[in-house]
Amino acid sequence: MTGNNSNLLDLIETIRTLRSEKGCPWDKRQTTESLVKYFNEEFTELMDAIQNRDYSNICEESGDLLYLIVMLSEICKENGQFQFSDVIHHVNQKLIRRHPHVFNGQPCKSEEELAKQWQEIKADEKKKNLFDTDLS
């Protein structure tokens, strides 16, 4: 895991360098809105690779999407909205919350019960607006 953390930190630092004063003009001018078309392109390429079971390409396209997610997070950090660690925290908390049968000792008897529980948790999250919080 240490290698994974180091690689992720290296990626974040690379993106920060690309967006810095001495960085790349293309990377510096990107906005949340300008990244949308690249997310669409890379997601489509990943889906094609998955359907073709091209695991080398799946790895490459997954990396391209990760780059875009980190880039998006850096742009949002620069704008005072949130940062990559918030993204990680929120998705981890969501996974734990939506899997009480794994993390809270609330077993489900069937796949149907599991699906129902999942939908109830999602609906409850929307009511509570868990992700519309101050992330600073």
Image (tube, rainbow, N blue to C red):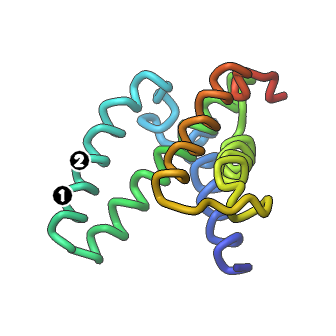
Picture coordinates of residue 88, whole percent (x, y): 68, 50
Q: Is mark 2 on a helix, strand or loop?
A: helix
The residue at 18%/63% (across/down) is 51
Other-residue count near label 2 (Cα within 10 Å), few / some / many at <14 / 14–19 / ≥20: few
Residue 84 visible in rendering: no
Where, by quadrant of the figure, is residue 123 drawn? top right
86 relative to 15 in the view: left or right: right
From the viewer's perspective, tell me whether residue 10 is left or right of residue 61: right
Q: Nearer the viewer, residue 105 or 13?
A: 105
Q: In the image, 129: left or right of 45?
A: right
Q: What is the x, y in percent for residue 85?
A: 74, 47
Q: Residue 15 carries which label?
A: none
Q: Looking at the picture, which amino acid does disc 1 mark? A: Asp
Mark 2: amino acid: Thr
Q: Please, which residue is most extreme toward the front here?
A: 109
Gap between marks 2 and 1, in whole Å?
6 Å
Q: Can residue 125 be seen in this view?
A: yes
Asked if the residues shown at circle 2 and circle 1 are in contact, with their CB atoms under 8 angstroms apart, the answer is yes
Residue 44, labelled with which disc?
A: 2
Image: 130 above or below 48 = above
- Mark 1 residue element: helix
* Residue in the image at 67% along x and 28% along y: 124
**Residue 104: percent from left, percent from top:** 79, 59
Residue annotated with mark 1: 48
Q: Quadrant of the C terminus?
A: top right
- Decide which of 134, 68 is in the foreground and name it: 134
